[in-house]
Amino acid sequence: MAAMQHRLLIEIVDLAADFIAMADPEGRVTYLNPSARGMIGMPSTQDARSTRLSDYHPAWVMNLLLDIGLPEARRAGSWSAETALLHRDGREIAVSQTIVAHKDARGRLQGYSTIARDISDRRAHEMERQKLIEALWRSEAQFKRAQALAHVGSYELNVPPSGQDYWSDEAYRILGLDPSPGTLAAEDAIRRLVHPEDRAYAEEVYSRAIRDGKPYSAEFRIVRPDGTVRSVHSLGGPVKGGDGSVIKLAGTLQDVTERKQAEKALQNLAGRLIKTQEEERRRIGRELHDHISQRLGVLAIKLDELRNDSAARVSGLDSSLEEPLRQIDEITGDIHRLSHRLHSAALHDLGLVPAIQRLAEEFSGRHRIEVECTFSSIPSRLPRAVALCLFRIVEEGLNNVARHSGATSAQVHLARNADGIHLIIADTGVGFDANSIEEKAGLGFISMRERCRLIQANILVHSNPSRGTTIGVWVPSKSLDSKAFGADDPAADPMNKLSRDGG
Ligand SMILES: Nc1ncnc2c1ncn2[C@@H]1O[C@H](COP(=O)(O)OP(=O)(O)O)[C@@H](O)[C@H]1O
Ligand SMILES: [Mg+2]
């Protein structure tokens, strides 16, 4: 019975997938199972009993066994650790190994047996995981760096709010918060951080994105906990769940404060340039009108006196003076017209409608282009800045008709309605490709746009090759309010200096 059991045991050991070996107290091998032979690449012809346990292990494992493993097995009965086997081709095979020390009844060492299981798969798996973690960490670090460089943070907000939203470190930094305390809820963020004046707008943007399931792009101000105000651009869209409902809003947050400031500075500069140009025009206009034409007038009177002098009549000088006098008269007329183009006295003295009418008449006479003007409910008194802006746009618009359109007629339409004032300048000439306006825009369109910006008006240029050109300007009611540009406070009127006194 015992022999049967022993044979069965040998059979099991022979069939086991693990490395199983036995050795005498000196480490000479007495038994090696087939799996063990396979794992270390021992040829089936070789007799295992000619080998030693030390032949199957790399040097570092042998040192470990001699210093710790075998003494510990002798002391405690067994010892286990992660070690390695050495294949004949030099490869190390990671194993989990147990060594048992066998003693007789009197405690004398009989020998050792050992069992080792290949764990290289597990090791490879762990190393793979380690690499993955490192790669993730690296890409996370890169992500953070990229966000910090671009001043762009990102977020994912749960819908409905759960208080478990994700904000990237850079998003926290933009909001002026410390990332370490963890989550910041979306509703909280809007209530706590969005500028009170922009709060309703920001709430509307996000709730509309959730309601309509559409992307959004919005700029608003935030107030950081330390009180500084920054401008941010939030760009994102809804993430939908399996049933099509919005489960998240995912987007980016960019700090655009510097860009906003630069834009504002540029606008201020453009506004100041226009203002300076108007001042210069007025100064030259007045100089021509008051000074030069005055002096020409005096000169003409003197020459006329000379012509009427009896001595001149006798000498025949009087008829020679006819031509110079006629020329002086012509020059005076030219100067008069020029000074009015530089600075419209009519605009100041009579108001926008008569000034445009005069401009149109003068233009028709000069260019043989018929201008049809219609006015509806235009108040006689408008903020000066508004009147000047509209007047200059009509002037430049008509100049363009003459210079570029080839049309023989043009329309100017000015109407007041509940929303504000609407100006249209149209021709049916050659037109142009309005898409290329950015690249071809001369100073004409640029200054029209800047003038509109000064009074918060909108301008739209519509043109089609061979279908003519239309310029539309909308001045909102709030810009028509007499207080819009501080009409009651002359110093606050951006165009004040330009039109306070006529020329
Ligand atoms: N009424 C128009 N008809 C046809 N082309 C026009 C008209 N107005 C403007 N354009 C085109 O747009 C360009 C830009 O106009 P603008 O900004 O006033 O600059 P500029 O008149 O100095 O060229 C013009 O050069 C012309 O090609
Ligand atoms: Mg032009």
Image (tube, helix red, strand yellow):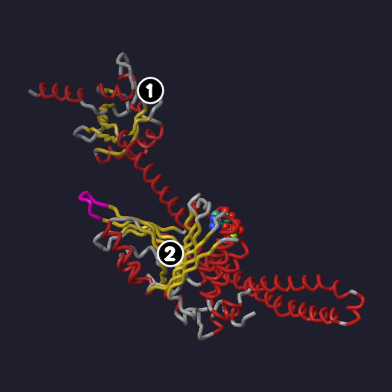
Establish if 483 lies above or below 40: below
- For residue 91: magenta? no
Q: Is residue 13 visible?
A: yes
Residue at the front extreme, as displayed: 314
Q: Is residue 225 visible?
A: no
Of residues 373 and 388, the one drawn nearer to the viewer in this rendering: 373
Q: Which residues are magenta?
A: 240-246
Q: Residues within 10 Å of mark 1 (few under 14, many from 20)?
A: some
Of residues 127 and 284, the one drawn nearer to the viewer in this rendering: 284
Q: Is the distance from the Cβ of mark 1 to the nearest ligand 1 atom less than 8 Å?
A: no
Image-quadrant location for residue 100: top left
392 with respect to 32 (left or right) = right
Q: Residues within 10 Å of mark 2 (few under 14, many from 20)?
A: many
Residue tagged 1: 88
355 with respect to 216 (left or right) = right
> What amino acid type is highlighted by mark number 2?
Val
Q: Give how far across and how far down residue 115 sits, in percent.
A: 25, 31
**Labels 2 and 1: the sequence-earlier one:** 1
Indicate the quadrant containing the N terminus: top left, top right, bottom left or bottom right.
top left
Residue tagged 2: 232
- For residue 243: magenta? yes
Residue at 46% of width from left, 54% of height from top? Answer: 145
